[in-house]
Image (cartoon, grey):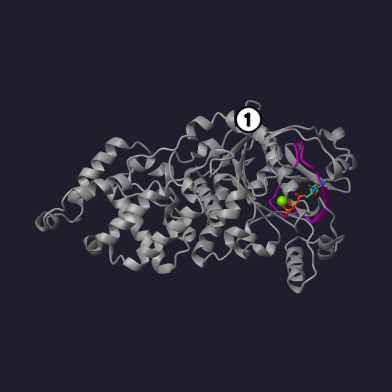
Amino acid sequence: MLKDRSILAGFAADREILLLPAMAARHGLITGATGTGKTITLQTLAEGFSEMGVPVFLADVKGDLAGLATAGSPKGKIAERIQELHLPERGYSNQGFPVSFWDVFAEQGIPLRATVSDMGPLLLARLLTLNSVQTALLHSVFRIADDHGWLLLDLKDLKSLLAHLAENEALYRPNYGNLPRQSLGAIQRGLLELEAQGAQAFFGEPALGLSDLLLTDAWGHGVINILEAQKLTNNAPKTYACLLLWLLSKLFEELPECGDLPKPKLVFFFDEAHLLFDHAEKALLEKIEQVVRLIRSRGVGIFFISQSPADIPDSVLGQLQNRVQHALRAFTPKERKAVKCAAEAFRPNPAIDTARAIEELGVGQALVSCLDEKGVPRMVEKAAIIPPQSHAGPLEPQTKARIIKSSPLLDAYAQSLDRYSAYEMLAEKAQIPSPSPKARESKADPLEAILGTFAKKAGQQITNQIARGLGRKLTRGILGTLFGGKI
Ligand SMILES: Nc1ncnc2c1ncn2[C@@H]1O[C@H](COP(=O)(O)OP(=O)(O)OP(=O)(O)O)[C@@H](O)[C@H]1O
Ligand SMILES: [Mg+2]
């Protein structure tokens, strides 16, 4: 619900709690124990952004956000809250919002894909649980592929390149250093595991185009992009975390710098945020921290959702400035510490014992502190959160299927493409005899002589952005992903 072009998130007694659109790119955090109201809060905020014309991307981890697409028919606690806050008199009306459903497994949404090349070595190394030596090797593998125009689009491409390198290590050693067979083997095994999780569907073409996440409907409402994330978080939690990181880095690399805007260009809700940070090594944490910090200048707001603020590293936590804290339990010493940490993160309000209030909050109540017009955190307030105007909970499968089928984006993504890429290039290369040692010596790069044929063929057949970078060095961004529009 909007009030004076801001999101009306709730009421503290009869004071309105507003989230200002100009402050949304200073990011946010929604925390609280299970069942305390995090998802409902997320849904209410997502609706508010949509109403103000801002597209949203969110991951539906439990399947209970699909209801955003249809009007609510409030019951139980939600109906009580609507009455208690006299919401109909304040402009609340049951309504659905424009939604695009996306699904990596192509079962419950438009297929969402990325190419291996676009994902980049850093995120892929995390996905494959590689150690530092193997990660360094994967970087070399990407460099070899980038340098030679061997397009890594799907897992098949990467697998064939790894097999090729294992067989021809000596040929590459002078330019790229050792490519230890054992480490190549570890990467290959990681890929097999990834396939066992069904994650190969994620890698390939047509890859997601960012502009398809930045849509508004005919009434000027921002489209809410819902990533079906139940199966993904259960079967392939690392793929989930890497996918969202890849999206963030893509947004950062491809959106132009825009300074502080009156309202964000996109708001990104990152549920189960702890999955992003669990076992993340220092280098990756630093990159995440950097992307979160810098993405603000691209007009993108990020809201993390997790049980406790303690799930988020301090360097990231410090950047999440609009905060909604639902109830936390404090039975164990660890839980008491988490409550203390959550309480200390707020600007104190002399009228509230923050730590105690966190324990005593009811369902759908929260301690809230958003930034004011000057970017200063407001004093913490105890608020009743406004329920969503759309349906709270899952959708009937038929309704969801109908919405997916009628999406104007489906045609562009429904069919996967298998273009001429590393797999085919290397298969052809295997048919051609190796050049004589003399021919090799005559070139600064011993491989250039053989590669010409393949690069040429690739250039004829491939029209995507990676192909445009063929023959030039590909530029990789902060998280090792391709500099999309800038190559
Ligand atoms: N703002 C609210 N107003 C009224 N009822 C609410 C509100 N927030 C939550 N509820 C009630 O509490 C239930 C649980 O809320 P929700 O699903 O948002 O919890 P959660 O914190 O996301 O839980 P989990 O950690 O299990 O995902 C809702 O189904 C609804 O009945
Ligand atoms: Mg939830």
Seen from the viewer's position, the closer of residues 206 and 20 is 206
Q: Position of residue 423 (x, y in %)?
A: 32, 47
- Which quarter of the figure is the N terminus placed in? top right
Q: Where, by quadrant of the figure, is residue 438 drawn?
A: bottom left
Horizontal and vertical percent position of residue 79:
86, 40
Q: Residue at x 88, y 45 (%)?
A: 14
Residue under label 1: 402
Q: Is residue 368 above or below residue 93?
A: below
Q: Which residues are magenta?
A: 370-392
The quarter of the image holding the C terminus is top left
Callout 1: 10 Å neighbours few (<14), some, many (20+)? few
In the rendered view, does 54 fall on the left or right side of 144?
right
- Inspect this view and state whether residue 471 appears: no
**Number of marks in picture:** 1
Main SS category, magenta section: loop
* Whether residue 325 can be seen here: yes
Describe the element under mark 1 as helix, strand or loop. Answer: helix
Q: At x 68% / y 65%, what residue is drawn? A: 310
Relative image position of residue 95 (x, y in whole percent): 75, 32
Q: Looking at the image, which residue sits at the far left? A: 438
Residue 271: x %, y % from top left: 65, 52
Residue at 84% across / 61% down in the picture? 357
Q: Is residue 238 above or below residue 279?
A: above
Image position of 264 (left or right of 392): left
Q: Residue furthest bottom?
A: 333
Q: Is residue 350 above or below residue 395?
A: below
